[in-house]
Image: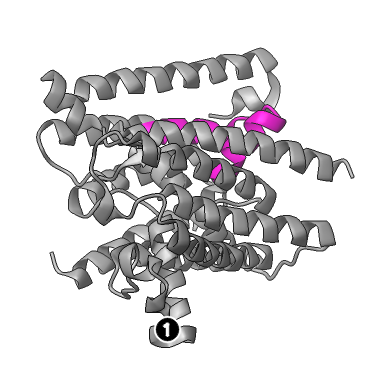
Amino acid sequence: MEFFRKTLDPVIALGAIAVLDIFLFLIVGAWTVGGGETMMTGLIAQFFMGDAIYRIPFWQEVFKPDAGYWKIYISLGMLFGAVVGAVASKEFFWRFPRRISEWVMITVGGLLMGIGIRLAFVCNVSTFFGLTPELNLGGYLSISGIIAGAWFGSLIYKRVLEG
Amino acid sequence: MSPVAQCLIAFVFGSVVGLLVQRSRFCNTAALRDAMLFKTFRNTKALLVAMMILTIGFTGFISVGAGNPMRFDVGINQVLGLFLFGTGMVLAGACTVSTWVKAGEGNFGAIWALLFTFIGMFLFSLVWSFLYWPPAPSAMTGELSLERLQLGFANAETLQDKTGIPAIIFGLLQAGVLLFIYQRIRKRERGQGGDAAASP
């Protein structure tokens, strides 16, 4: 099938995703990822800690663990869709970072993303595909933050690339 | 709508997004990083097109009272949080979407980034439980609060309510700004010539 042999133009892909996101906005709410990831964090923590998790006020007052939270299933769907795409196009294979510096950057980067999402209450997806198109003030604040952060991260990235 | 139906719709939406992002190699991190570091705009243009469509679609439906816009107070925490996030996504080489998509391609680095995103969220939940900042949804007032560094809540709905001008008018203005940026990029690429100009 041609779809799985050639790389799709990202303008067409993102155009299609935007149209679908409008339907999602009408039914439940715009596309977001950070909220679902937070709920997954809560569910994983609850799995290991049991009811002790409720001694941490955040998990009582902000995100009470709930497996029926719809945003979780967007992320799981993305994983599923990516596996289907990768397997069908014969692009699935295990890859591992090779250098220690890559492991360090990914670890620090992952931590910063998690902390940043919870501090802001939004992620990059809500910023670009939800808040800003809704003309929400938070979208403009978030865009200024993410551009400054990406610029700062790029300086570090460049320095590491240059060795 | 029942919670099960909501979850099902979310899963179907996510599956199509995962497939399209995997096949197109779109990456939000690259949309910002490559524009800044390498002056290439393949992903940036796609991001701008999506934002134009969404702006017109969302504000159009908000004009007639339809849709489910996000409602919560915003403030300095959005700037700080997304600054940390933006730095992190460039270091990790993936954003929230591409971590899931790359994980689905067998990229262990993306799985590792996802694991540490969860750990970062959990660590922040501990910090929040001491600071109680930014305010929990139940403590949000929708009003300006300087002591809590919160600006309140404003979006296309509140613009329409306060000005009496349909939200779609503001949406068209924003889409026009995005189109202007998109055309500037295209002009720059044409000036550079070569493959970049040939790409859509």
Is residue B18 shown to the viewer in this render? yes
The quadrant holding residue A92 is bottom right
Magenta-drawn stretch contains B160:
no
Q: Which residues are magenta?
A: B26-51
Is residue A2 shown to the viewer in this render? no
Identify the residue at image location x=12%, y=27%.
B161
Residue at numbered disc 1: A52
Quarter holding the N terminus of chain B is bottom left
Question: How many discs appear?
Answer: 1
Q: Is residue A85 left or right of residue A50?
A: right
In the rendering, at what x and y percent does residue A79 appear? Answer: 48, 66
Disc 1 element? helix
Q: What's the magenta bit mostly, secondary-structure-wise?
A: helix
Q: Tell which of A119 and A122 is nearer to you.
A: A119
Identify the residue at image location x=68%, y=41%.
A153
Magenta-drawn stretch contains B30:
yes
In the rendering, at what x and y percent does residue A104 appear? Answer: 76, 59
- Neighbour tally class for label 1: few under 14, some 14-19, many 20 plus, Cα within 10 Å: few
Given the image, what chain letter belongs to the residue carrying mark 1?
A
Mark 1: which amino acid?
Ala
The coloring applied to the image is one colour
**Is residue B160 placed above or below A113 in the rendered structure?**
above
Q: Tell which of B104 and A155 is nearer to you.
A: A155
Identify the residue at image location x=39%, y=46%.
A126
**Is residue A15 placed above or below B123 in the rendered structure?**
above
